[in-house]
C-alpha cells in the first residue's frame, strides 16, 4: 500500500486531527506540559517569517511546478496531488486549531505532517520517474522538509514545552 493511497491519507489525517484536539484540550486544561502560546523571541520570529516564505516556495510552489512538469504522467499527478492535498489540510488544520484551541497546536500538527510528508516523498522517490531537472527539484523539496523537521525539534518544540512536572 502506497502513501498516496486514499485510506492511508485519511487515517493519517484522522489520527493527526485527534492528536491536535487532544493536545489543545490537554494544554487548555493544563494537563500537558506544553504552553498554550508560542513564546518565540523576536529573533526567532524574524527567522520564522523568513522560514514561512521559504516553505511557500520549497514546500508548495516548487511541488506545483513539478506537478505541472509531469502533467502527462498519471502516477506523478496522483503523487503530487496527494502531496498538495496533505499540505492544504495541514495549513487549514493549523489555522483552525490554533484559533479554536491554543496557538501552540501548530507545533505538533507541523511535526506530524512534516514526518508524514517525508514518508510521502520517500515513497514517491521509489515510484516516480524523474527527469534530471525534476530530480533536482524533488531533492530540494526533500531537503527543505528535513530541515523543517530539524527546525521544529530545535526551535519550536523547546519553545512550547514546559519542563515542569504535571499538576496533579
Image: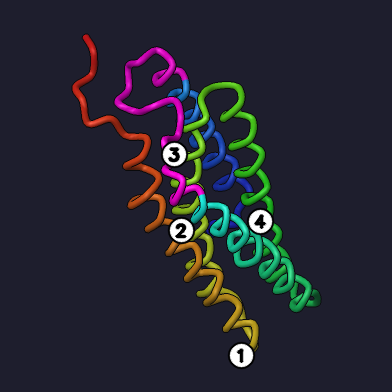
Tag 1: Cα neighbours inside 10 Å, few (<14), some, or many (≥20)?
Answer: few
Residue at mark 1:
132
Residue at mark 2:
148
Helix, strand or loop under label 4: helix
Image location of residue 132, percent across then percent down: 61, 90
Between 113 and 15, the residue placed more toward the observer is 113
Is residue 35 rendered to the left or right of residue 164?
right
Majority SS type along the magenta span: loop
Helix, strand or loop under label 3: helix
Report the residue at 59% width, 41% height from top: 10
Q: CA distance from mark 2 to mark 1?
A: 24 Å
Image location of residue 106, percent across then percent down: 51, 38
Query: Which residue is farthest front?
Result: 42
Q: Residue 99 — which label?
A: none
* The C terminus: image quadrant: top left
Residue at mark 3:
108
Of the image marks 2 and 4, the number of the one nearer the N terminus: 4
Of the image marks 3 and 2, the number of the one nearer the N terminus: 3
Query: Which residue is farthest left?
Result: 165
Q: Is residue 129 above or below residue 117?
A: below
Q: Nearer the viewer, mark 1 or mark 4?
A: 1
Is residue 44 rendered to the left or right of residue 34?
right
Tag 3: Cα neighbours inside 10 Å, few (<14), some, or many (≥20)?
Answer: some
Helix, strand or loop under label 2: helix
Residue at mark 4:
82
Report the residue at 39% width, 12% height from top: 29
Region rendered in magenta: 25-45
Amino acid at each position: 500500500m502506497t502513501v498516496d493511497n486514499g485510506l492511508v491519507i485519511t487515517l493519517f489525517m484522522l489520527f493527526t486531527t485527534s492528536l491536535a484536539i487532544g493536545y489543545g484540550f490537554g494544554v487548555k486544561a493544563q494537563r500537558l506540559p506544553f504552553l498554550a502560546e508560542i513564546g518565540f523571541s523576536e529573533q526567532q520570529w524574524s527567522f520564522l517569517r523568513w522560514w514561512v516564505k521559504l516553505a511557500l516556495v520549497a514546500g508548495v510552489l516548487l511541488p506545483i511546478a513539478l506537478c505541472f512538469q509531469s502533467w502527462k504522467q498519471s502516477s506523478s499527478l496522483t503523487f503530487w496531488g496527494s502531496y498538495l492535498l496533505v499540505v492544504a489540510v495541514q495549513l487549514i488544520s493549523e489555522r483552525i486549531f490554533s484559533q479554536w484551541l491554543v496557538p501552540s497546536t501548530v507545533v505538533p500538527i507541523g511535526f506530524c505532517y512534516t514526518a508524514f510528508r517525508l514518508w510521502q516523498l520517500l515513497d514517491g522517490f521509489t515510484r516516480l520517474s524523474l527527469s534530471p531537472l525534476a530530480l533536482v527539484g524533488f531533492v530540494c523539496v526533500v531537503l527543505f522538509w528535513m530541515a523543517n523537521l530539524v527546525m521544529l525539534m530545535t526551535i519550536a518544540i523547546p519553545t512550547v514545552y514546559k519542563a515542569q512536572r504535571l499538576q496533579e
